Amino acid sequence: MKNFILLLTMLSVSLVSAQAFKGKDDNKFQVGVNLQENGSGINLSYDYGIGENISIGLSTTYLLGVDEALKDNQINDLNADFDNRFDLRARFNANLGNVINIDENFDLYPGLSLGLKNFGGHLGARYFFTDGFGIYTELNVPFAKYKTEDLTPAETLHNQFTINFGATFNL
C-alpha cells in the first residue's frame, strides 16, 4: 500500500510539473486582451523555439472597441477602419526563464517586433500552472513609427504603448 501511495504521489507531482520555455521546438499559443489608449481588443500570438533561449513568432491584434479621441480639447471620431484596427507583427524573443531561474514555471521574455505600423519592443512574462496552461502579460512600445508626422487619431492605434494579458498554452 505504501508503494502504491508513493507511486501515485510521484505520478501526480510529475503531471503538475510545468516548464515555461523548453527551448528548441517549443510551441506556445497565447490569446488575450489588448489595452491601449482609445481602444481595446483581442490579441493572438504564436511563438516557436529555435534555440535554448530564442523563439520567433507572430502576433496579431484586432481592436473590437474604439473610443472617440480627444484632440485639441475637441472630441474627434476616430473613424478607425479595418486597417487601423488590425496589426500583425513578426517577433523575436529572448526567453530568460532558465537564466534568471526564479521558477521553472516562469519565463521572462524581452523581444523585438516588426509590424505593419512600427518597429517595436516588448517585455513579456508567462507563468504555467500545468504543463499545458498558464497566464501571460506583455508590455509593448514602438521604437520607430513608419509615419511620424500628422498622425490622425485612428493612426495612433497600435502606434503607442499597449498592454496584453491572457492565457497561454503549450502546443
Image: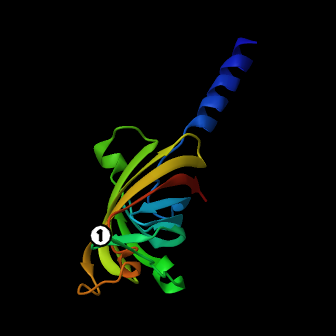
In the picture, measured across the screen, residue 104 lies left or right of residue 14, that is left
Q: Which residue is painted at 53% across and 60% down in the image?
A: 28
Q: Position of residue 86 (x, y in %)?
A: 50, 78
Q: Which residue is mark 1?
A: 73
Q: Horizontal and vertical percent for residue 63?
A: 52, 70
Q: Is residue 120 visible?
A: yes
Above or below, 113 against 146 in this view is above
Instruction: Please name the amino acid that badge 1 sits on.
Output: Asn
Residue 170 occupies quadrant: bottom right
Task: Report if residue 86 is visible in the image.
Answer: no
105 vs 72: above or below: above
Q: Nearer the viewer, residue 150 or 59?
A: 150
Q: 72 or 60: which is nearer to us? A: 72
Residue 9 percent location from the top left of the image: 65, 23
Q: Is residue 29 above or below residue 149?
A: above
Apparent side of residue 136 relative to residue 120 in the rendered image (left or right): right
Please give the name of the residue rendered at 70% of the width and 12% of the height, measured from the top-left corner: 2
The residue at 59%/41% (across/down) is 130
Residue at left 29%, top 86%? 146
Q: Residue furthest right?
A: 1
